[in-house]
Amino acid sequence: MEYMQAPATSSQGNILCCTCGIPIPPNPANMCVSCLRTTVDISEGIPKQVNLNFCKQCERYLQPPASWVQCALESRELLALCLKKLKAIRLRNSCDLSIQVRLIDAGFLWTEPHSKRIKLKVTIQKEVMNGAILQQVFVVEFVIQGQMCDDCHRVEAKDFWNSVVQVRQKTSHKKTFYYLEQLILKHKLHQSALNIKEIHEGIDFYYATKQHAQKMVDFLQCTVPCRSKTSQRLISHDIHSNTFNYKSTYSIEIVPVCKDNVVCLSPRLAQSLGNMGQVCVCARVTSTIHLIDPNTLQIAEVDGGTYWRNPFNSLVSPRQLEEFIVMDTDIIRNQKLGAGAGIRSNKHTLAEVWVQKTSEMDTAQQYHCRTHLGHLLNIGDLVQGFDFANSNVNDEFLNKMNPSRIPDVVLIKKSYNRSKRVKRRNWKLKEMDKDREGMAPEDERQYQDFLEDLEEDEALRKNVNIFRDASKIPVESDTDDEGAPRISLMEMLEDLSLTDATGGEGADMLTE
């Protein structure tokens, strides 16, 4: 302890200490430093040993009353946390004049990292008798005590999630889920999820806070046509503070329509979409359902609200598609739509084709139909389609249609040699870390269908991050032996940016 005295003048004399009688320079207390030290202790009321709660799992310190902060040893954040424990000290910029002890300096003293002790050297000042200012330096020891935070406690108790987003789609194909997975990876919404669990007909996303779950729900509603429901379950209730602890569940139902599905619209909906035909093909599913009429090439988009007001189902699953061979084709040119009709597709070509099932090559049975795949089909090509003439379809709107307006066959897409397409594919996609037992053979086949859709659909490919596959050797030719379009990395570069498989900056990253 020392006495902070004013600058002495030449005419100032000495006085005697009122306690011990030794001559000293004049001061407001009229006492020497030794007597002041024995009489007044300005550090009285300041604890010399303080407990500091520390969570070993997440390595955070408790900041009263209930927040946990991340602090490194001997950091400014840890120094501020320790000084807040000394409530009897007033900081320099504090406006509380009722506390006379003022902090002048503070710093850490070295201790063993494993000692669970933090020592702080503190310098304080205080005004004592008759305005005399005393300054004192002392050491405060902080004892680190282990305490598990609430977040780590919920993790250890296997009850760590606060909100869950359940995404469901009642279809037999997962193309929409594969597309949604790539969008989530692109926007990095999976990083805030505690766990992702894949179950039948959907995926569950678990979150620690309700805000993260609500953010995922908003993203899904802007990305895919869907509807949502919310429910809460009371976990605990504090009657003294009137606080409630809920677990929230968000149920997201995606429309049960996927790419390449054949649907039958209601007469009211078909009329509102520009008098298009009721039997349509789903070209793709993004934020809306893109439909195309194979008889007129008329296209329309159905959003989620319109779908749930006028719902329609898929008439055929991918397993029910049959393989046909093109026997003859005739391009239809300059066909005009009727009055009040909608927009016509410029990417497709209308054609009349005669096809025969590959399973009925020993017969003379052929089918005539119109298709929107005139720009792809040639005589002898294989194409997948649905046979309405020999099928029993139970659909409310299809059963009420005039049989003369129902086509015998609806062609969906051209068939290629899958093994060759997989071999020449020199790119790949990332996948989320999900809890699942493994990919079934049927799921692997559906995933390959999704990759083929990315190769064939430029509009769908623009919304997906594609990564180069270093294990594949690039192929220079534009088409394979069967004439299938070969999508290379440089061709994809024209409409999207490709990144390295690691997701970081590197020599393999390509940008537009």
Image (cartoon, grey):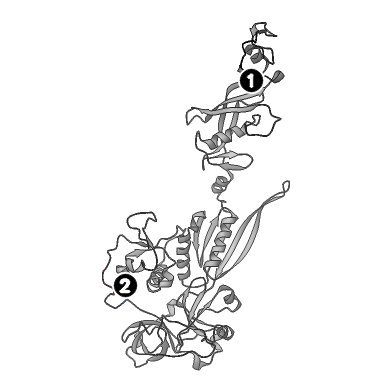
Seen at 56% across and 61% down, the residue is: 165
Q: Tell me: 46 left or right of 361.
A: right
Q: Position of residue 233 (x, y in %)?
A: 65, 57
Q: Secondary structure at mark 2?
A: loop
| In this rendering, the label closer to the viewer, 2 or 1 | 1
Q: Position of residue 511 (x, y in %)?
A: 37, 61
Label tally: 2
Q: Is residue 394 above or below residue 228?
A: below
Give me the disc on residue 134: 1
Give me the disc on residue 486: 2
Question: Magenta residues, as a range?
Answer: 473-484
Kind of residue at disc 2: Arg
Query: Residue 419 or 48: which is nearer the viewer?
Result: 48
Q: Residue furthest right?
A: 240
Q: Position of residue 31 (x, y in %)?
A: 67, 12
Magenta includes 480? Answer: yes
- Within 10 Å of disc 1 (Cα), the crowding (few <14, some 14-19, many 20+) is many
* Quadrant in which the C terminus is drawn: bottom left
Q: Is residue 200 above or below residue 316?
A: above
Q: Main secondary structure of the magenta part?
A: loop
* Quadrant in which the N terminus is drawn: top right
Query: Residue 343 or 292: which is nearer the viewer?
Result: 343
Kind of residue at disc 1: Leu
Q: Earlier in the sequence, mark 2 or mark 1?
A: 1
Q: Is residue 359 above or below residue 67?
A: below
CA distance for labels 2 and 1: 85 Å
Q: Secondary structure at mark 1?
A: strand
